[in-house]
Amino acid sequence: MKQRRLIKTMFMILHFLLVYYGLITYTFAIDTLSTSQILTYNETIVSRQGIFELGFFRPGRSNNFYLGLWYKKLPNQTVVWVANRDTPLIDTSGELTLTLEGVLILRDANMGNVVWSSSENSSTTTIAKNPIGQLLDTGNFVIYEKSDNINQENVIIWQSFDVLTDTLLPGAKLGCDLVTMNERHLTSWKSEDDPALGDFSYSIDTRGYPQAVLKEGVEIMFRRGPWNGLRYTGSPSMRPNWFYNFTFVINKREIYYQYNLVDTSVYTRLVLQPSGRLERLLWIEDKKQWSVYTTPVIDRCDQFAACGPFGICNISNSPVCLCLKGFQPTSPDQWRKTDWAQGCKHTIPLDCEPSEGFNKYTNLKLPDTRGSWYNQTMTLAECEKMCKSNCSCTAYTSSNISGTGSGCLLWYGNLTDIRTFVENGDTLYIRLSASELDIIENNQSSSADASARRRVWVIIVPIASVVLVILVSICLFYHFIGKNQQQQGRRKLGHDPENISDDQDVELLQFGLSTLVKATNNFSINNKLGEGGFGPVYKGVLEDGREIAVKRLAKTSTQGLHEFKNEVISISKLQHRNLVKLLGCLIEGAERMLIYEYMPNKGLDSFLFDKTRREKLDWTARYHIINGIARGLLYLHQDSRLRIIHRDLKVSNILLDKDMNPKIADFGMARTFGGNQIEANTNRVVGTYGYMAPEYAGDGIFSIKSDVYSFGIIVLEIVCGERNRKFIHTERCNRLTGYAWRLHNEGNSIQFIAKCLGESINIAQVLRSIHVGLLCVQRYPEDRPTMTSVILMLGSEGPLPSPKEPGFYIEKTMQDATQSSSTYETSSNINELSMSILNGR
């Protein structure tokens, strides 16, 4: 009896030890699957750092079960890979095992049949001797042969990264293995509840020079274009950023695109949605949700072959399609009906004559490369020679624009799916007949000749005036000049000695009073567009149909001839797409008027601060406006003939044309610097409270950095949608700049974003804009960047310096906010007018 009890006790101890050992082994091997294990429903494999999890799941409202991979730590299950997407399990009877040969087998335990096997879509024929399955922290589930030698790497015989579904994770490759001929591409789910193969796919097409394409079935819907060494040619804004970088590899073994995390704490994924929309998503921890970071398909010109062969799409045009220079519509009637499918043809057909050459086209998305030819070592000169020697070659370019440029890319036959970009597009050399090249060259020469003739007339007119001076008495001469100027509609304006040197006269078209009275319907209240410190602004229509804006100096205005002359002198010679164009002026009796091009969308403030219209200003439009203002300021500060300080930059002085392009207006307060002058002091401080830099408002010192401060305020107002001076946070009691600075320091800048922008914003662009805005509004001018640096910072995605405390920042308590609430209510109704302050010496 005692012997039996002893045996029973020993058996229980042995059983306990076996169970305990099993638990220890399972805990240690939580990220692996061995040949002796079976993974069933409610059991999972978790990567070593707990980032990803593999197991069985049921998507959405579906009743089916699948083996898949998802993020472990995120509250909402985000599936990134599915094994049996077209052969679902109808219940929880699934079992996953790893065979001795290194093959994953998914069985239906009830039916006894194999539902899915890793050998179905594997290009590997290796048979493992000691296989192990492991889930890595990259989200890649690998099967490798465990090596007996600790110094020898384990050999991977299968991995989920080779069998992509709808998601591309960091480290995975999109492309083709030229050795195994395994193609890795994305395929959309059928719906949010069904991971079966959908209608859309995204892949690297290797027929010709490799290019990224999005297809519906077998039809190309969108083409990102070939890789040019820096980016896809159809994605000019594609740049490395603060949390991931990317690469594109072309060699004899493989062709692929890949991105990798710079900041491993970030969750991001490239997903092909069931709708066919390709999105890069970024996990926003504060909101506990995924947000769209970028999407390559933006506008109508992204539609594949929108303008047909040899047609070019320009989203800024209406209609969007044009023929390339040297080409004409194949079917003019269809073209006029906006049916561009037949595209364009050579105006003068090619006949393979030696005199044929190439015309250079810039800022393009390169054409469809299917059937093209490329060489990665040839020079551009060798490329041109090779194309010219082949009568079927229609175009060429460098295949790699990084560095000094290299490689050769040739097209044969039609050139399809070309679009133009404002900047960062590629260069293409297209074959034309000698006659067509002569026509293009003559047109360019004619333009140059016209400019030369205008310059000649500028010289002749003063000489003729001198001759008249000799022939006519001084008194009669002045009488004649005055009369002639009135007839010619021209007026010479002298300069304010405080602003412009005396030798810089301005010649400007002068309108007659009767013309402007008629154009504005006698300055009807119905034509009034608004009113500023200078006076009211009216819309007018000239007899030739041109729409104009007439700014009339008010009798009660604190501004006068000084500001009037200053604005004419400052802006009349400026030519930039982001500056409002001054068409002319009127000086007649006591009347002083300025005539501008008409801006149908009025001022930026009419959108930004209007509760009903602000929603029409999405983030894309706001970011476009920010960059446009920056380019306009850079021109004033650096690229114009003289350095101009605006001194009254604010949202109401940013006008919007019909395409929502921003144009800086109102140069009545502007000052001009010459040579290397960088700052000045004035006893007459002018501008608008809320936009003035501290050193200017306090000491009258102004420079380009005072404009930079105003720009920073505008950026923050554009992002937040609130006025700087009228904003008080109920809890933090800061004005807009202080509120933005505190949120930035706390890492909560996302709370600063206007709620009307919704979820479809580009998070990285918004946060970067806030950061740049804070750098611009720093208290001391030497800390603020120049506009050159601002544009570089907005356009790049590298690290930025930390902003210091903004100007006028005063920490307030809740008690202070309560005491000042009545003052705030009063000030919220005050118009933001330009102010002039006279300070005694």
Image (cartoon, rainbow, N blue to C red):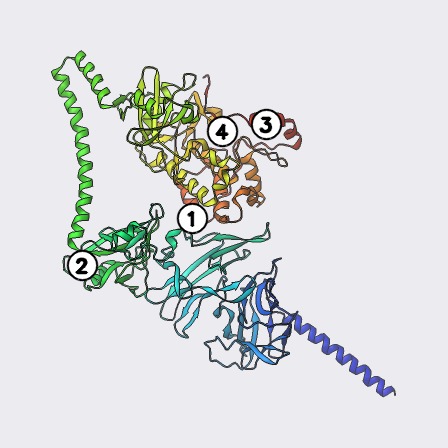
Mark in front: 1 vs 4: 1
**Pick the front one: 642 or 756:** 756
User: Disc 2 versus disc 1: distance between alpha carbons?
Assistant: 43 Å
User: Disc 1 versus disc 4: distance between alpha carbons?
Assistant: 29 Å
Query: Which mark identifies residue 545?
Result: none
Mark in front: 4 vs 3: 3
Mark positioned earlier in the residue sequence (1 or 4): 4
Q: Which residue occupies the extreme right position in the image?
A: 1
User: Disc 4 versus disc 3: distance between alpha carbons?
Assistant: 21 Å
Mark positioned earlier in the residue sequence (2 or 4): 2
Element type at mark 3? helix
Q: Which residue is mark 4?
A: 694
Residues at marks 4 and 3 touching, judged by CB atoms closer than 8 Å: no
Mark positioned earlier in the residue sequence (1 or 3): 1
Mark positioned earlier in the residue sequence (2 or 1): 2
At label 1, the amino acid type is Ser
User: Disc 2 versus disc 4: distance between alpha carbons?
Assistant: 66 Å
Mark positioned earlier in the residue sequence (2 or 3): 2
Bin the neighbour count of mark 3 within 10 Å (Cα to Cα): few under 14, some 14-19, many 20 and up: some
Q: Which residue is mark 3?
A: 824
Q: Is residue 828 left or right of residue 214?
A: right
At label 4, the amino acid type is Pro
Bin the neighbour count of mark 1 within 10 Å (Cα to Cα): few under 14, some 14-19, many 20 and up: some
Residue 90 percent coordinates (x, y) = 61, 72
